Image (tube, rainbow, N blue to C red):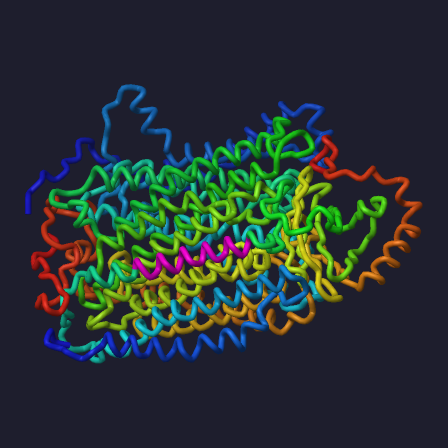
């Protein structure tokens, strides 16, 4: 273990107390002010021609500028401008020391540069929007209880569908990376911070602003396009669609910055001895994900700006009536959109492979294969997007290629499964709550993956495309994959992050409730799709009522099981408050060797790594197929 | 589990897998197979049923390989007493021959599936929309019955260019005929999904999307829009018909008479129609 100098704060702490200062409150005040200033200024640009083009009389320029102004005001109110301004004025760089070991909750309501605080901000912030998105899902299933009786109007229903999709695919992109990569990557590679701590904070607050922008769509009439926003339908949209544009623009900026920050951290800030072959598998998954984020998200930003220009500057990129092409949107969107779904999936692979060695009490089986699998998925995900467009009417010659490339992506995904099976083999499997969620992931993702093969096969896809089959498929991969692994992560690292024990028995009840209701919700939807029900419809053939009612009731149970988790969390952190042990899982990875809660600067001295990243297990004779493990652990 | 454990775990798993696969695969092929969508309303639809059956049959051994192994591992290697000391398993870090065989088997499966899918696609186009210049033209396509599908918010209408471009509000097709659908849209992106025919083709404004289908016997067709196209997307559905050739001939003659007054006011038949350049797409 090599000693490295502890940071010596150069600036004197400037403690800010109370509501006045740069915090969430001033952020909201300046955000509202920024909205109105930009909105009124936008009204001045407003020309006579805009009214003529807009069927609703709503001025898109005004509203989009309002969003921009509101977000800038919000960020300025939070204090993001302070540091750049101070540097421009010639002040020396300073470390914000006031937050270190500060008691109380105030530190969570303003900019923080401590990766542990940011990860908790992410966790709570995303959870709020996850529950909003989940509520939308419950409303969708309420509407689909009957083919003829309607709870919502058609427009309202489509807005709910669109908000559910956008919320889940936009906000939940960072659902795993936001809380857990921010928390764990610096710890696991032996760094005290991320490469760009202020950018780390910026990604969080941008995402929160994005969520508010999306919800604001209900004040402007909602949007009817779903999360894919296909043109030229979206160009018909009222100002509610501007909220979609603003939301995804902010999300894409946040994603690019987050990916950049994580990649830079992993590449440059590893502690001595943390070679690439000792990198924990979760960090590899974050690296693969951040590459996707950096490369794919800017594509979305550009696409959305083109869409915004079609609505405000009278361009016609996507409007066939004036020489544009709807295919352009479909292609650009899915060039981003397909890597995006792997941004959701790959961190789940990393979590599962990270946790299995701990609970099987064995080293990770096939470390290199696992790395190759995640990197392979990340790489191939850029070459498959046209499988969303098999029957779209674009030049059809490339369909055999996209069929092949899509099916090839199941190879690296299969590596992950082999590593899961290999790690459990001859292990001493401890059935804890995180382990249950990992196994649940394996079960669900298996069916998600296999159903994906039906969608990748063009003849099968002709029927399944745009039906509930596709919807069931990606809910198996995202809800059954990402969300189950997310819960594994929450139950596993939750005690370390919060400092309190979670109730094991209630956790098991929650797992079984969630696992059964999940499969009971989405399994029958494969059949619903096969029987010919298209997605995003407010009404359906009466013959499908039975299945739909079954699915809706299961979905309500699924919703309750998620609320039950909220109770478990609140019970552990607010009511029971039983301090967690430093290492309740007997893990050998570095974050568990630190005290709970982890001190502000993480390490007293920067650690030096040596040996295997997963030093579990007893030596086995080579005759049994084992290689002799390195006995030295991390630290 | 000590390191001297010589229980033949691998052979047991292999045997269990073999039994599960041997039982489930025939069930899937012979019990579920005939009921798979989209039925035998057309040659292409029947082809899709074959594809679905092959995929489902192949997914059985794959799913069983994972599930049986996982289930066996949970059963055989589970630590039953969690209160005792934490004991480690053997430190096996990999097995290159298992990895190699996994790679060989999964790669062969994937290459087979891609090859199979491509061959099936190239036989008759599988009923999917192929854009204005199809990759796959079935035999005799030059004499196919041309039917233009016009999608607009929120309905489908049909034009028969071989019958003076008559426009009808419902779809009727003759049995045992090669039909060439020309799917296009007047406003936003729709998708023409004729379920029993196994046809799905997006309708784009300004694009002529061609899909072929060989009808077989008379049947009803459930037609849905399969791409979100605005507020009343959920209500964009119809019932079409495949009827005998004689019935079709008399129906289309009747339609030509019935819709003759309306035809005078229609835009001349064209491969595509462009939305008005002004206004929001409409």
Q: Quadrant of residue B23?
A: bottom left
* Front residue (pair B123, A171): B123
- Give the left or right position of residue B190, taking residue A436 as reference: right
- Give the left or right position of residue B216, taking residue A293 as reference: right
For residue B11, above or below residue A278: below
Q: Residue at x 47, y 47 (%)?
A: A402
The reply to whether residue A265 is in sight is: yes
| Image spot of residue B198 (x, y percent) | 64, 59
| Image spot of residue A489 (x, y percent) | 31, 59
* Front residue (pair B218, B68): B218
Q: Residue furthest front?
A: B140
> From which residue to which does the magenta span run?
B103-121
Q: How many marks?
A: 0
Q: Residue at x 12, y 44 (%)?
A: A606
* Front residue (pair A407, A433): A407
The reply to whether residue A151 is in sight is: no
- Give the left or right position of residue B51, taking residue B59 as reference: right
For residue A41, above or below residue A131: above
| Image spot of residue A600 (x, y percent) | 21, 47
Decide whether residue B106 is among the magenta residues.
Answer: yes
Q: Residue at x 44, y 39 (%)?
A: A252
Q: Main secondary structure of the magenta part?
A: helix
Q: Quadrant of residue A44?
A: top right
Decide whether residue A160 is among the magenta residues.
Answer: no
- Give the left or right position of residue A50, taking residue B102 as reference: right
Q: Quadrant of residue A292?
A: top left
| Image spot of residue B108 (x, y percent) | 36, 58
For residue B68, above or below residue A444: below
């Amino acid at each position: 273990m090599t000693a490295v100098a502890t940071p010596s704060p150069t600036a004197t702490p400037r403690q800010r107390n109370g509501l006045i200062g740069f915090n969430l409150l001033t952020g909201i005040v300046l955000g509202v002010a920024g909205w109105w200033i930009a909105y009124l200024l936008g009204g001045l640009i407003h020309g006579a021609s805009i009214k003529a083009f807009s069927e609703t009389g709503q001025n898109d320029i005004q509203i989009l500028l309002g969003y921009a102004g509101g977000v800038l005001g919000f960020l300025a109110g939070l204090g993001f401008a302070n540091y750049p301004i101070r540097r421009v004025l010639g002040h020396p760089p300073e470390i914000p020391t006031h937050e270190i070991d500060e008691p109380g909750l105030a530190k969570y309501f303003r900019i923080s540069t401590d990766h542990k605080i940011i990860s908790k901000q992410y966790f709570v912030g995303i959870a709020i929007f996850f529950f909003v998105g989940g509520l939308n899902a419950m409303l969708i299933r309420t509407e689909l209880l009957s083919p003829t009786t309607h709870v919502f109007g058609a427009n309202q229903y489509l807005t709910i569908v669109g908000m559910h999709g956008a919320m889940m695919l936009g906000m939940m992109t960072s659902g795993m990376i936001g809380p857990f990569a921010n928390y764990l990557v610096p710890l696991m590679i032996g760094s005290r911070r991320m490469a760009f701590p202020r950018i780390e904070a910026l990604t969080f607050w941008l995402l929160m602003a994005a969520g508010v922008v999306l919800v604001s769509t209900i004040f402007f009439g909602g949007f009817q396009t779903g999360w894919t926003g296909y043109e030229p339908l979206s160009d018909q949209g009222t100002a509610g669609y501007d909220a979609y544009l603003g939301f995804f623009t902010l999300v894409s900026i946040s994603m690019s910055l987050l990916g950049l920050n994580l990649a830079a951290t992993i590449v440059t800030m590893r502690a001595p001895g943390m070679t690439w072959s000792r990198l924990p598998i979760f960090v590899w998954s974050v690296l693969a994900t951040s590459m996707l984020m950096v490369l794919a998200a800017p594509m979305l930003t550009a696409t959305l700006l083109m869409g915004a220009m079609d609505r405000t500057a009278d361009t016609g990129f996507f409007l066939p009536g004036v020489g544009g092409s709807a295919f352009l949107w479909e292609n650009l969107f899915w060039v981003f959109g397909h890597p995006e779904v792997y941004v959701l999936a790959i961190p789940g692979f990393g979590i599962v492979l990270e946790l299995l060695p701990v609970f099987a009490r064995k080293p990770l089986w096939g470390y290199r294969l696992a790395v190759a699998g995640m990197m392979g998925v990340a790489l191939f995900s850029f070459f498959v997007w046209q499988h969303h467009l098999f029957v779209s009417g674009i030049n059809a010659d490339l369909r055999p290629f996209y069929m092949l490339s899509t099916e090839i992506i199941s190879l690296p995904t299969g590596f992950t499964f082999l590593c899961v099976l290999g790690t459990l083999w001859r292990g001493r499997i401890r059935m804890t709550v995180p382990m249950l969620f990992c196994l649940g992931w394996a079960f669900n993702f298996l069916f998600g993956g296999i159903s994906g093969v039906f969608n990748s096969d063009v003849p099968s896809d002709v029927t399944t495309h745009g039906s509930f089959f596709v919807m069931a498929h990606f809910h198996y991969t995202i809800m059954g994959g990402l969300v189950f692994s997310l819960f594994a992560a929450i139950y596993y690292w939750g005690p370390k992050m919060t400092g309190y024990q979670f109730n094991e028995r209630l956790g098991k009840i929650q797992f079984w409730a969630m696992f059964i209701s999940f499969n009971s919700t989405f399994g029958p939807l494969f059949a619903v799709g096969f029987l010919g029900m298209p997605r995003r419809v407010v009404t359906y053939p009466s013959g499908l009522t039975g299945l739909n009612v079954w699915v809706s009731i299961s979905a309500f149970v699924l919703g309750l099981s998620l609320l039950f988790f909220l109770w478990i969390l609140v019970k552990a952190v607010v009511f029971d408050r039983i301090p967690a042990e430093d290492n309740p899982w007997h893990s050998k990875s570095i974050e568990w060797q630190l005290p709970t809660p982890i001190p502000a600067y993480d390490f007293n001295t920067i650690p030096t790594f040596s040996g295997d990243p997963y030093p579990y297990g007893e030596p086995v004779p080579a005759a049994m197929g084992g290689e002799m493990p390195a006995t030295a652990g991390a630290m | 589990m000590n390191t001297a454990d010589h229980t033949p775990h691998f052979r047991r798993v292999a045997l269990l897998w073999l039994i599960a696969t041997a039982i489930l695969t025939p069930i899937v092929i012979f019990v579920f197979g005939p009921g798979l969508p989209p039925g035998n309303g057309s040659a292409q639809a029947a082809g899709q049923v074959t594809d679905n059956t092959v995929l489902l049959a192949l997914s059985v051994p794959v799913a069983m390989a994972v599930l049986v192994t996982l289930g066996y591992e949970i059963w055989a290697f589970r630590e039953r007493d969690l209160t005792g000391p934490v004991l480690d398993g053997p430190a096996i870090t990999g097995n290159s021959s298992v990895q190699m065989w996994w790679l060989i088997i999964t790669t062969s499966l994937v290459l087979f599936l891609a090859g199979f899918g491509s061959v099936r696609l190239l036989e008759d186009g599988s009923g999917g929309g192929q854009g204005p210049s199809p990759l796959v033209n079935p035999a005799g396509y030059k004499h196919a019955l041309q039917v233009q599908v016009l999608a607009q918010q929120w309905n489908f209408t049909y034009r028969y260019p071989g019958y003076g471009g008559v426009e009808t509000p419902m779809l009727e097709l003759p049995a045992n005929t090669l039909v060439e659908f020309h799917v296009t849209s007047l406003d936003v992106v729709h998708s023409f999904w004729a379920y029993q025919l196994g046809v799905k083709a997006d309708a784009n404004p300004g694009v002529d999307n061609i899909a072929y289908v060989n009808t077989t016997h008379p049947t009803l067709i459930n037609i849905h829009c399969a791409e979100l196209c605005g507020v009343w997307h959920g209500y964009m559905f119809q019932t079409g018909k495949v009827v005998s050739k004689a019935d079709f001939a008399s129906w289309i003659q009747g339609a030509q008479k019935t819709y003759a007054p309306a035809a005078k006011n229609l835009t001349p038949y064209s491969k595509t129609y462009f939305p008005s350049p002004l206004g929001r797409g409409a």
